Amino acid sequence: MSAQTMKAIRLHEHGGPDVLRYEEVPTPEPGPGEVLVRVRAVGVNPPDWYVRGGLSGMPEDYRPTIELPLIPGTDVSGTVAAVAPDVGAFAVGDEVFGMLRFPGFEGSAYAEYVAAPAADLARKPDGVDHVHAAGAPMAGLTAWQFLLDLGHDEPSPFQAERHRPVPLGPGTTVLVNGAAGGVGHFAVQLAKWRGARVVAVASGGHEAFLRDLGADEFIDYTTSSPEDLVRGADLVLDAVGGPRTSRFLPVLKRGGALFPVFPGEFDAAETARLGVTVSSTQVRSNGAQLAELGKLLETGAVRVAIDGTYPLARAAEAHARAAEGHIRGKIVLTVE
């Protein structure tokens, strides 16, 4: 069991990385359906800096109320320290990893201990250390739910229709934009694992990295426009997304699909004329899917790239690094 207090990062106000405070707080107790995890590593994800900044970039209709002080973070890897009486899937001493309570901002992962829903966890893969395991959940599940299996019937805030992945295999071509980042580098590997031909788009310094992950073709967006070079793709997974994502529509063959991770604006008449589909979704915690991803991590079929690690107390430096952009893989906080 834990002590009565622990170290954690908390937000007392919104702002830049400097608002992340390292302080002593009460250690949580696991409630029904939960386990207490002694955290060893924490994955840093875009929602962490969105909530730090007050979610100012989200449309007001989608913006939840954030109560402060708040411990940010969702992605953890660690060891089970205590188990609620109604949990049978895990025992004290088990090594686990997971994305906690997402979508939502109550994950409380930036801490020495976290009370985690057992359903959000999976056993940490053998041979994968806590740093790499902590880098996997959100980015890996995002790629998994976009590309392979949505895994739930919850409505998306981005569209009325249920997101439906495109069947991938030999003979299909997938273009991944933002391929070197967290979601992108998982998408490259999962598409390749399914047998697809993968075109990776990133800046030039990432070419060797992405070819090593399995990319068949590389496009340096700083010197070439992928929308001018590629035609007939079955799928574009745009891990950057946003306002400019519609530029990838001409890349697709008729019947193809564009999956922007961050949705943008589209002309319905244009997509109908081109005969293509645009679809998005919102990643959700799913321990069962994470267990499947864990099998691929254990065999080495999928790898987690680490851009850098920072001690929990230096979370502000990790967020400052994230703000620089051009991240290769994941940023991870370590908890001693």
Image (spheres, rainbow, N blue to C red):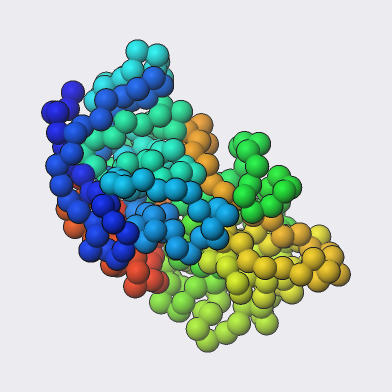
Give the percent coordinates (x, y) of residue 202. 49, 73
Q: Nearer the viewer, residue 104 or 123?
A: 104
Give the percent coordinates (x, y) of residue 47. 42, 54
Q: Residue at x 25, y 30 (%)?
A: 28
- Report the residue that reaches farthest toward the bottom: 223
Q: How many marks?
A: 0
Q: Residue at x 21, y 44 (%)?
A: 8
- Report the residue that reaches farthest toward the right: 273
Give the percent coordinates (x, y) of residue 277. 76, 59
User: Could you say which quadrant of the image residue 327 lies in?
Assistant: bottom left
Q: Residue at x 29, y 56 (%)?
A: 13
Give the percent coordinates (x, y) of residue 172. 71, 58
User: Left or right of 318: which side holds 187?
Assistant: right
User: Could you say which quadrant of the image residue 188 lies in?
Assistant: bottom right
Q: Is residue 40 above or below residue 308?
A: above
Q: Residue at x 62, y 50 (%)?
A: 157
Q: Can residue 190 be seen by looking at this rendering?
A: no
Q: Which quarter of the rendering shows the C terminus?
A: top left
User: Left or right of 14: which side holds 6?
Assistant: left
Q: Can residue 327 be seen by looking at this rendering?
A: yes
Q: Which quarter of the rendering shows the N terminus?
A: top left
Q: Is residue 302 above or below residue 179?
A: above
